[in-house]
Amino acid sequence: MTTAAHELLTQLETLSPALGSPRVRALHLPPLPADGSRRGEFAALELDDGAVGLAYVLLEGTLARLRADADGWQARVAGRPALDVARAITGAPGLDRTIGWAAAHALAHSLARRVDWAPPPAGDSLAGLAPGPGDHLGLVGLFGPLMDRLVASGAQITVLELRADLAGRHEGYEVTLDPAALSACNKVLSTGTLLLNDTLDAVLAHTRHAQRVALVGPTVSGLPDVLFSRGVHVVGGTWIEDATAFVDALRAGQDRGASARKFTLERGDWPGWQALLTRLG
């Protein structure tokens, strides 16, 4: 089966020429967070048409490694066609793949801006899952800030993790290393890290019978067609309203304010990338 990344790249190969093959203007990195906050969670790739794409960089020291060679990364991507940078989404997990996802999202942002399309605002941080008694909630990764709220919902909770040291029974939830455990869950919540570490298709193979599957985070802020076609019901990401103000705040390590907002997009509310493409005229 063709992977989600390969399928998306095929879409981008049609989309990019229709957009005039935009090039990368710059890679913007936040400062390393000194206070343990998540303020430095995004890197932003800016295109020469003003569009911006995001990638999550707090995974396995990604931001520190990018900043250690910031000038080198700037030289590697600046001036290149965004599509060429995006081709790395089909490669091995690592820094190139991370920046590749930012390029893929930037092309999606470019399309949406040109046809004046924007996703609806987020209703809540759980993408409308509304877990409660009687639900069996599957989490892909520990959602640290949300765990107390999720446990208090009364739902049975199974957490899929990569770290063996976390496996076992915890107060209010159980952690497993086996993705097949998700097949018993009627609701599933995951971050877009699945795209970065190339485990999306393997994990979604065990969520086919869930009533509702949600993927959230900056790494799912691009074209969602490949996610919806694989059984995801809703995506939640970050939508950039003012690219210039967003980049300035990101580089300074400041709050993004009104320059960006969270969104939640249901599968039935997405017109499809080809429908948006036809609006370009």
Image (tube, grey):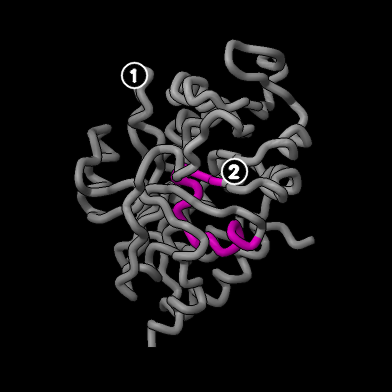
x and y, in percent, of residue 118 in the image: 33, 63
| Residue beneath disc 2 | 196
Q: Quadrant of residue 35?
A: top left
Q: Are marks 1 and 2 in contact (CB under 8 Å)?
A: no
Judging by the rendered image, the residue that carries numbered circle 1 is 34
Q: Of residues 69 and 198, which is closer to you in this image?
A: 198
- Image quarter where the N terminus lies is bottom right
SS under mark 1: loop
> Residue at (42%, 78%) from the top-left corner?
20
Start and end of the magenta stretch?
A: 214-229
Please indicate whether residue 74 sits to the left or right of residue 227 in the image: left
Q: Position of residue 63 (x, y in %)?
A: 46, 32
Whole-number angstrom distance, CA of label 1 to CA of label 2: 24 Å
Residue 7 lies in magenta, yes or no?
no
Q: Quadrant of the C terminus?
A: bottom left
Amino acid residing under circle 2: Leu
Q: Name the residue rendered at 59%, 47% in the picture.
A: 213
User: Element under label 2?
Assistant: helix
Out of 226 and 189, give the one closest to the viewer.
189
Residue 92 in view: no
Marking on residue 248: none
Is 114 placed left or right of 156 in the picture?
A: left
35 relative position to 146: left or right:
left
